[in-house]
Amino acid sequence: MLDAGSRDRTVAFACSAGARVTERPWTNFLDARRYALAQVETPWTLMIDADEALDDVLRDAIVSASGDSEAYVMRRTTYFCGKPMRIWRDEPLVRLFKTGRAVLEAHPAFASGAALHEAWRCDGPVGELRGTLLHYSYADAASYRAKYDRYTSLEAASLRGSLLRTLGAYAGVAVRFAWLLFGRGAILDGPRGWYVAYHSAAYPAVAARKALRA
């Protein structure tokens, strides 16, 4: 396990479960995950975050995987205020792979140079596992707002301020909001879904505005 200076009991729990813990100062998401991969000594790598968990079906699927593929996709569902969100349901992610056969790439939401929204890519055969990767990222609205503010600020820091880009980003908010509500089913999640859909739609505009003000 790689720990970047957590202040809770993460390290203690990991050690009590028999995990080998490596502590390293935080730099960014890409650096942390690439460093963690460099510490892996087993033929296969399973990478999950501290706020993620395997459901029983996925756990069994990992154990019984044939190993014919070089990597496996897991479907992740993210929770908000204790409930799964349709807007974040069944997100396909490569998380299990033969060590050394996958590379990590950043996919910032606003085409910036930020080391955010990273994903593993494998050019070899990729299979898919049954079950769900449970992502308990946002316990409440306050934790969502804090992460939202942090991520948009990181995106803005790698953008060059542009009035034209900012206006264009704001012009697309309504279209993105409608797509997330009806195309992705956020409207069915009630006020929680509408809240997340709106802020997700406004994300590029917020990042662009922050970059413009910098």
Image: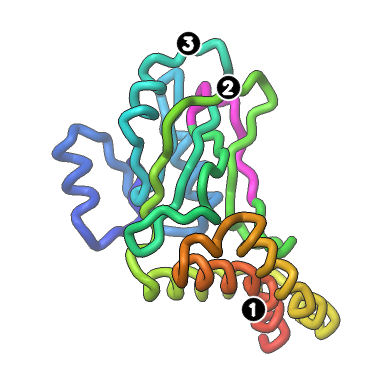
Tell me the residue at 71%/77% (across/down): 208
* Element type where label 2 sits in the image: strand
Asked whether the beta carbons under mark 2 and mark 3 sit within 8 Å of each other, the answer is yes
Q: Residue at x 35, y 36 (%)?
A: 54
Q: Amino acid at mark 1?
A: Val
The answer to which image quadrant residue 43 occupies is: top left
Between marks 1 and 3, how big is the CA–CA gap?
45 Å
Please tell me which residue lies in front, 189 or 107.
189
Type of residue at label 3?
Answer: Ser
The earlier-in-sequence mark between 2 and 1 is: 2
Above or below residue 88? Residue 173 is below
Residue 44 or 179: which is nearer the viewer? 179
Which region shows up in magenta?
A: 96-106
The residue under label 3 is: 66
Seen at 51% across and 73% down, the residue is 195
Report crowding for label 2: few under 14, some 14 to 19, many 20 or more residues within 10 A (C-alpha).
some
Element at badge 1?
A: helix
**Could you tell me which quadrant the N terminus lies in?**
top left
How far apart are the alpha carbons under marks 2 and 3? 10 Å
Q: Position of residue 80 (x, y in %)?
A: 40, 61
What amino acid type should be assigned to the residue bearing mark 2?
Gly
State the image coordinates of residue 193 (x, y, percent, origin top left).
Answer: 50, 65
Q: Secondary structure at mark 3?
A: loop
Q: Which residue lies under the disc numbered 1?
A: 206
Q: Which residue is mark 2?
A: 127
Based on the picture, tell me whether residue 39 belongs to the magenta stretch.
no
Name which quarter of the figure residue 73 lies in.
top right
